Amino acid sequence: MNIEGICKSFGICGEIVACDVIKSGNINNTLKITVRDGSGEDCYIVQQINTHVFREPVRMMRNISLVTTHISEKLGEKSDRMVLEFLKTKSGDSCLFDDEGRCWRSYRFIDDSVTYDLCDDLEVLEQTGAAFGNFQMMLGDFDAGALFETIPDFHDTEKRMNTLFAHAEEDSLARLAEVSEEMKFFCENLDRAVKLTRMQKEGRLPLRVTHNDTKCNNVLFDTHTKKALAVIDLDTVMPGLALHDYGDAVRFAANTALEDEPDVSKIALSDSKFRAFTKGFLTACGGVLTDAEKENLVDSIIVMTMELAARFLDDYLTGDKYFKTDYPGHNLVRTRAQITLARDVILRYNELNEIVKTLL
């Protein structure tokens, strides 16, 4: 089936006048399709879903459909630019399998929108926080248990840590000796790392709908006003903790360096970026968060930073099979960068909590 056939299957009518490859994103193949009919031109996004990564695309698309429908119904007339509108086939399906077994989906392109890969603009960071906070607020009354777990145990930090310790004990590549300081850090701070997982299992943190990739480039902004419009890239939407989304966003956005910076003296948590994102996030969803969630915002940054550090180190100890690496030892550099950031947050734990209190 060619692209014209795929478009027709999703009810996209008119002459295709442009078919542009969108290169951002490294999982799905994405096209921007422009069609023209008697009333003018319209644009759509058509994506081939990577079924090697997302092995159950039908269930994944059901998650996305449930969540976007819920948000759209709450937004009413505002929904045309504030939430992705996925198209359905004539049979009512959100995805389509072609003759070669490839899986496709489509949604309306939001005009006059832009994304930012990296940003030092505090206004944009505050708007990013507001976008993900609004995502939580809109879904605060949604039953997260109705969603399929796209990646099982994705943020079960305790399980991640246990896996790291088991692989360290095996030391199949004889790399353990050079990471003794890193392993010491994980052992000494294990209780911090597993805090949220244990609280959730004990029923002290609610299960919510989570995005699980809360980076700035997963928010669409109005090209002219820089105001956040819609949260995108919903493939990893599933049940989880709001604190995982928040902590991972701050870990990435408020870092003074890249997450694989080899010079750890450059790495710290930026107070201004931390404040900007947190202000936007809490302004949008502070009313739906529980006291326990609010009290553990800073802890969540530590948890998510340590979790990623553990994943990097585990990959290093087992042969660099999961994360793409650019040079030998890349995963170890990443590990040390994340540990440095976690140490900085731990060191300034009380100070950062005081900042949070001023924003509640």
Image (cartoon, rainbow, N blue to C red):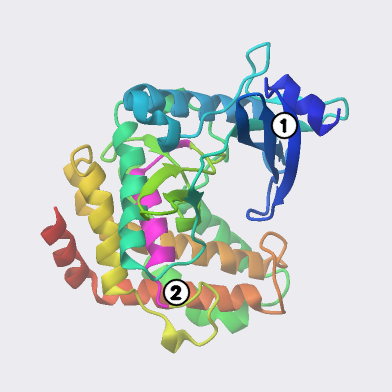
Q: Residue furthest left?
A: 358
Q: Position of residue 92 (x, y in %)?
A: 63, 13
Q: Based on the displayed image, in which of its 4 quarters is residue 334 positioned?
A: bottom right
Q: Is residue 201 left or right of residue 331?
A: left
- Who's the residue at 38% across and 71% down the image? 342
**272 or 306, which lies in front?**
272
Q: Is residue 213 left or right of residue 24?
A: left
Name the front one of labels 1 and 2: 1
Using the image, determine if residue 218 lies above or below residue 357: above
- Packing grade of label 2 (10 A; few <14, some 14-19, many >=20) is many
**341 or 157, which lies in front?**
341
1 and 2 marks in contact (CB < 8 Å): no
Confirm whether the magenta stretch covers residue 353.
no
Give me the disc on residue 339.
2
Q: Is residue 139 left or right of residue 287?
A: right
Q: Based on the displayed image, in which of its 4 quarters is residue 288 positioned?
A: top left
The disc, 1 or 2, on the residue closer to the chain's N-terminal end is: 1
Q: Name the element at disc 2.
A: helix
**199 or 22, which lies in front?**
22
Confirm whether the magenta stretch covers residue 253.
yes
- Who's the residue at 65% across and 69% down the image? 317
Q: Name the element at disc 1.
A: strand
* Magenta stretch: dominant secondary structure: helix
Magenta segment boundaries in residue numbering? 238-256
**113 or 97, which lies in front?**
113
Q: Position of residue 14 (x, y in %)?
A: 72, 25
Q: Position of residue 18 (x, y in %)?
A: 74, 42
Label 1: which residue? 104
Using the image, determine if residue 102 lies above or below residue 278: above
- Who's the residue at 50% across and 43% down the image? 232
Residue 202 in sight in this render: no
